[in-house]
Amino acid sequence: MPGKARVHELAKELGVTSKEVLNKLKELGEFVKSASSTVEAPVARRLRDSLGATDSPKRSAPRPAPPASRPSPTDAKPQPAGEQARPSAPVPGPAAMPGRPGPGPKPGPRPPAPK
């Protein structure tokens, strides 16, 4: 759909929340249901103009950069020998639950068929 933009995309572009964009569109007389809704190019242009002209304090402060990277599990530091992690307790299976019968004995080989 060329010429249309989603509300959440416009919010990301303008550095504001989708809720703020929805409220501004309502002020401009546009009926938009949700952040997934699309708006025509002229409406998006009016929105950019109106939000660009009113610089709110929220948008003037730069956003913090995302963390560079998280350490992977393989990068974890090995624990000293005396402080090794203990395995967790086994989870009870269906046979260990009270009030339920266990799986029962495994069937053995079948007897030969009568001739």
Image: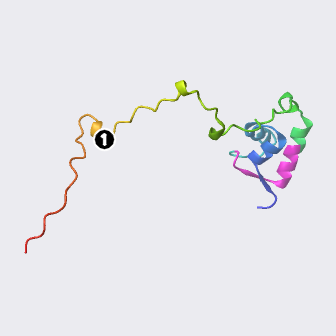
Question: In the image, what residue type sits under mark 1?
Answer: Pro
Residue 73 seen by the camera: yes
Where is residue 3 drawn, in percent x and y? 82, 58
Where is residue 31 drawn, in percent x and y? 73, 46
Q: Relative to the observer, which residue lies in front, 106 or 32?
A: 106
Q: Is residue 102 magenta?
A: no
Quadrant of residue 24 within the rendered picture: top right
- Tell me the residue at 29%/36% (across/down): 97
Quadrant of residue 26 within the rendered picture: top right
Segment tinted magenta in the rendering: 35-48
Where is residue 51 drawn, in percent x and y? 86, 39
Name above or below for residue 52 compared with residue 114. above
| Quadrant placement of the N terminus | bottom right
Where is residue 102 drawn, in percent x and y? 24, 43
Q: Is residue 7 left or right of residue 77?
A: right
Name above or below for residue 78 compared with residue 94. above
Dot 1 corresponds to which residue? 94
- Tell me the residue at 27%/40% (across/down): 95
Name above or below for residue 54 compared with residue 35. above
Looking at the rendered structure, the secondary structure element under dot 1 is helix
